[in-house]
Image (cartoon, helix red, strand yellow):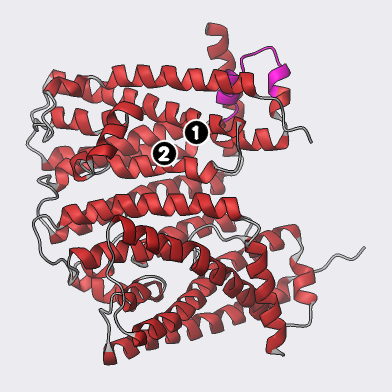
Amino acid sequence: MIRHAALYARLVGARGRGQMQYRLSFATLVLASVLVTLAEFLVVVVIFGRIPHLAGWSLGEVAVLYGLSAISFAMAEMFAAGFDVFPRQIVQGTFDRVLTRPLGAFFQVLASELALRKIGKVAQGAAILVYAQHSLAVHWSPERLVVLALTVVSGTAIFFSLIVICATSCFWTVQANEAVNVLTNGGTAMISYPLDIYHAWLRRLATFVVPLAFVSYYPALYVLDRADPLGLPAWVGFLSPVAAAAFGFLAWTVWSVGVRHYQGTGS
Amino acid sequence: MSTRLYWEIGKRAFQRQLAYRTANLAGLFTNACFGYLRGSVFIALYQTERSIGGYDVSAAVTFTWVTQALIMVVFLWGWWDVEETIRTGDVVSDLAKPFSYLGFWLARDYGRALYHLLFRCCPILLIGEVMFGLRWPTSPVTWAALALSLTLAVAISFAWRFTLNLTAFWTTDARGIGGLASILSTLLCGLLVPLPYFPDTVRRVVEALPFAGILQIPADVFLERVTGAGLLLALGQQALWAGVMLGATQLLVMAATRRVVVQGG
């Protein structure tokens, strides 16, 4: 474990230094990652300029959803960047080389990349949360702060697992990549708004199959002291770590099956 | 220069797209998912309001699906075909050919846009109709105006994308700069939210910018929100920006061409 951690720091450190060689490029990428989130949130602000409430939620309350999903997704993207470029390894056949090295394939893909540029998006998400906190009259009790912190960690783990599962689909087909990415990009877009505006089947999907509802919606209901319009008890807001663990286990299983199934591209 | 040549170039570009069937299917799935999600958000907005910025709920939902359907027709993100030829040096052979460099790429883009109109835009509108029920144009005049509006929309978006690509003649980080610029165009073209939703003072400015001609105006034509004199004015605004931007792009091509030095060997 310690050996792996040291190795991870070393490999990722090299990637980091590599990214810093192109300072201007890096700065542009960070700026772009900040501006995308800002532009998307600006749209929410524009909408709330026209209407006071969205399905009973105020701007500050939607901002909590926005901030939580932005931070979790950006952190997951940062750490799972290796799985983002992993399809290319499959196509080019370089994954064969990974399999011959005396280290787990999962670890090697994980340590192959760290997208430091996503730090801009994380900061942006945090800023939106701070903004939300200012416009809301929420008392920040220790329980609430603990739930919030656990939610960010669990949310990151849920998105991380999702990215791994999406990447694993490449063991079977490399053509469905864009369709698979809908789960992550579409998922973030979905959980940035109160989940009760969607049809029941989609809410169930986001609760029981791909547990994105635990990244923002259920914890936000607890933190904001809102009753679930669908009648779920308040303690569902504490379940994010459980959902993250279960989904993480699923991702690991899918990945293992994929690696065992892999036979190389041949040509 | 013979129009026949550009016709053939466009035809080839259309045929080339036919090879990417699986990619198009994946894209259809993506656009449909976002159409559904955004449609749901807009329906929620209208729980308490009858009309926002002049759109009622069915107009807003239709607007969402029309803009999703048009994303690839106007190729909103990630078109770096020209930048790639500049980076690899292949641009030299294109510049040496005896036709207009701008015309060559414009013809290719129209061929590609026609493909996406048939195989991306139309299916997405049908999916939107099945899932939400859309408000379709009622008059044949609207369809004719829509065809013209889309032709101009592709010209405007092409000029914008082409300009971003051409910056590669001066900088090695064209994609980074282009990425920043396309955040601006995404926000101001009407994809994320109809421009009349913006506060009134901001709205007047953004509606006059060329980006409005990329998605906002074609979608409003589809919805018959602009008719009669208003329609002529909207199409006129698109034509004006298309002309100005293509003209500016041609000047940029000339400036860039002077920079090109071919190393022999």
Residue behind mark 2: A184
Q: In this orientation, does residue B100 appear?
A: no
For label 2, count other residues whose C-alpha is less than 10 Å away and answer few (under 14), some (14-19) or many (20+).
some
Give the residue at x 21% y 59%.
A46
Kindly identify the residue that appears in the image at 59 percent across and 34 percent down.
A170
Q: Secondary structure at mark 2?
A: helix
Looking at the image, the residue that sits furthest to the front is: B130
Residue A76 % position (x, y): 42, 31
Q: Element under label 1?
A: helix
Q: Chain of mark 2?
A: A
Most foreground residue, B81 or B137: B137
Q: Is residue B234 above or below residue B45?
A: below
Q: Position of residue A55 (x, y in %)?
A: 13, 47
Query: In the depicted view, which residue is nearer to us: A241 or B93?
Result: A241
Task: Name the chief secondary structure element in magenta.
Answer: helix
The image position of residue B198, as x and y in percent, is: 22, 66
In primary-sequence order, the first of circles 1 and 2 is: 1
Does B120 sit above or below residue B108? Answer: above
How many angstroms separate mark 1 from mark 2 (CA)? 8 Å
Kind of residue indicated by mark 2: Thr
Q: Determine the residue located farthest toward the bottom in the rendered image.
A: B229
Magenta-drawn stretch contains A112: yes
**Residues in magenta?**
A98-113
Q: Which residue is mark 1?
A: A166
Q: Amino acid at mark 1?
A: Cys
In the rendered image, which quarter is residue A148 located in?
top left
Which mark, residue A111?
none
**Magenta stretch: includes residue A239:** no
Residue B253 placement, left or right of A65: right
Q: Is residue A38 left or right of residue B160?
A: left
Whether marks 1 and 2 lie on the same chain: yes
